[in-house]
Structures are given as C-alpha cells and as structure tokens.
Image: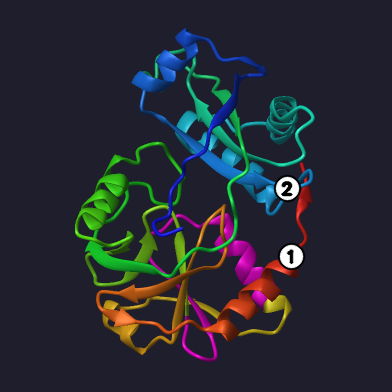
C-alpha cells in the first residue's frame, strides 16, 4: 500500500437519485462548500453505517441549517448501489440551488452518491511518517475543504515519506491526513485527544476494544511521547489496521499482538445493513 490513497475507478454518480448532469457537477466543482462521508460496502453491509448517517445529518444541520433525513440518505445510497453487494461509496452533501451567502434564505442540500469499485482493505507495508504543525478548520466535520491537508501530505511525500501526521500548536498529536491514529504502549490503546475528525472507524475500533476487554483511553498525547510507544496504526474507512513503522525517525517494530487485538476488536462490532 505504501502511502494511503483514495484512487478507484468511478462507476456511478447520482445526485438526489438521478444521474448527475454536467450542470450539477459544475456546481459541485466551483462551490467548495459542503461535507461528505466515505464508506465500504461489503456483502450489503457497512461497518458503522448508522454512524455515517448520523455524521451526515449533524454536519448538514451545522453547514446548511437543515438536518438531512436519515431515511432519505439510506434510500439514495441503496438506489445508487443497485444490485451491487460490495462497493466503495462516497456521499457528498452540497447546495445544488440557492444562495449560500445569505443565511436568512434556507438552502435544502442535495445529496450526491458516488459508487466505485471496492477498495482493497488489507493493510500494506508499514507507513513512514513525519509530523507537521497543522490544524484543520472545523476539524469535527468531514467537510470538503481538504486542500490544506492534501498539500501537507504532498510535502511529506516529496521528502520521501509516505504520509503526514498532524500536531497542533500546543505540541499535541492530532490525526493523519485522512486517517486517525491509534497507539499502543504495551497495555493500553491510546487515541490522541485534540481537535480532530472523530473518525467512524476509530470509534468502532474503540468500541470493539472495550468489548474484548482491552484498556482504551482518549487523552492528550504530546509529540515527545511518541518515542515511548511500542506500536501505532492508522485507521480510516478502507483499512482499520494499517501499521505505522516510523514517525520522525522513531521506529516501531511490527507488533503482531497489537494487530491481533485490532482484528479482534473489529470483529466484535457487527456491520450494519445498508
């Protein structure tokens, strides 16, 4: 796998249940305002599907003053999937019509569903990372303003790294470019507490670890503490256990025990029907 990517051959794009038109896509391209979520459908199920619906509803309430109806989103996803049992699905919420500059005039958001071939979910070789001081705007929402984080990843890859790990201005470890990080000190799994996107995969892994009796803590983690960790993993919608091999020159040996715990945790949380 090397660096984490989001490349897949696009198959279907629908907006509000209809095939996307060039005019619709033009609006998406030129109006950089909205939010999204990405999920992996496997045999008609999605890990954390209800959490994805919650994310879309809550972010729409903040960005558009209009909470999406969960059942509407569910129907649109099923329509775009058709008979496909397995696929990669991305749901974008944007303003197809209306004036976003005037908050006194409500805008009913549109829903774009993109269905692509399934991504391979197996982890790749351990990632080699470097840190960068960077804080995303409105980090708690999975919004479309991603230029900054992609640029930071490009900088890291230009220097020979696979990806970037963000640290805030207080020196606290936050998140990766498009993923959350989990660290293992030999006894406890640690999720950094900072202004980060509360990733659905991270949440599910945390639930699963608790179910199998593994101590889990979310706390501020300072940059210098990375040297005392025994293992680390990146987790996002495609892969929940991508090993991290090196951060800023600190090497983490491959920890089969940690990886086995993550696999057990994932299996402990059943996937939802779409």
Mark 2: few/some/many CA within 10 Å (<14, 14-19, 20+): some
Which callout, 1 or 2, points to the residue nearer the camera?
A: 2
Q: Which mark is residue 82?
A: none
Q: Which mark is residue 269?
A: 1
Q: Is residue 65 above or below residue 37?
A: above
Q: Residue at x 47, y 10 (%)?
A: 22
Q: Which residue is mark 2?
A: 42
Residue 121 visible (yes or no): yes
Q: Residue at x 72, y 42 (%)?
A: 86
* Image position of 81 (left or right of 9): right
Q: Looking at the rendering, which quadrant does residue 268 occupy?
A: bottom right
Q: Quadrant of residue 26?
A: top left
Q: Pointers 1 and 2 in contact (CB under 8 A)?
A: no
Q: Position of residue 33 (x, y in %)?
A: 39, 29
Question: Residue 166 lies in magenta, yes or no?
Answer: no
Near-viewer residue (216 or 159)? 159
Report the quarter where the C terminus lies: top right
Please provide percent x and percent y for residue 271: 75, 55
Residue range (magenta)? 184-209
Colour scheme of the rendered structure = rainbow
Is 157 located above or below residue 151 in the figure?
below
Q: Residues within 10 Å of mark 1 (few under 14, many from 20)?
A: some
Q: Is residue 197 magenta?
A: yes
């Amino acid at each position: 796998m090397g660096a984490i990517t989001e490349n897949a051959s696009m198959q279907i794009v629908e907006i509000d249940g209809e095939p996307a038109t060039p005019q619709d896509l033009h609006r998406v391209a030129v109006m950089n305002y909205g939010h999204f979520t990405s999920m992996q459908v496997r045999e008609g199920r999605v890990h954390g599907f209800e959490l994805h619906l919650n994310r879309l509803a809550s972010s729409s309430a903040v960005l558009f003053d209009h909470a999406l109806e969960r059942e509407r989103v569910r129907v649109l996803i099923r329509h775009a999937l058709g008979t496909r049992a397995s696929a990669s699905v991305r749901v974008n919420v944007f303003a197809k019509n209306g004036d976003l500059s005037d908050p006194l005039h409500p805008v009913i958001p549109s829903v774009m569903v993109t269905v692509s071939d399934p991504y391979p979910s197996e982890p790749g070789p351990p990632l080699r990372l470097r840190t960068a001081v960077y804080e995303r705007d409105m980090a708690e929402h999975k919004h479309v303003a991603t230029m900054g984080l992609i640029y930071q990843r490009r900088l890291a890859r230009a220097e020979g790294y696979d990806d970037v790990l963000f640290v805030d201005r207080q020196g606290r470890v936050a998140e990766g470019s498009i993923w959350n990080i989990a660290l293992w000190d030999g006894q406890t799994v640690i999720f950094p507490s900072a202004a980060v996107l509360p990733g659905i995969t991270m949440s599910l892994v945390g639930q699963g670890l608790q179910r199998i009796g593994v101590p889990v803590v979310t706390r501020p983690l300072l940059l210098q503490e990375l040297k005392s960790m025994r293992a680390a993993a990146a987790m996002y919608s495609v892969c929940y256990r991508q090993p991290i091999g090196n951060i800023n020159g600190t090497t983490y040996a491959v920890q089969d025990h940690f990886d086995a715990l993550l696999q057990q945790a994932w299996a402990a949380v059943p996937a939802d029907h779409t």
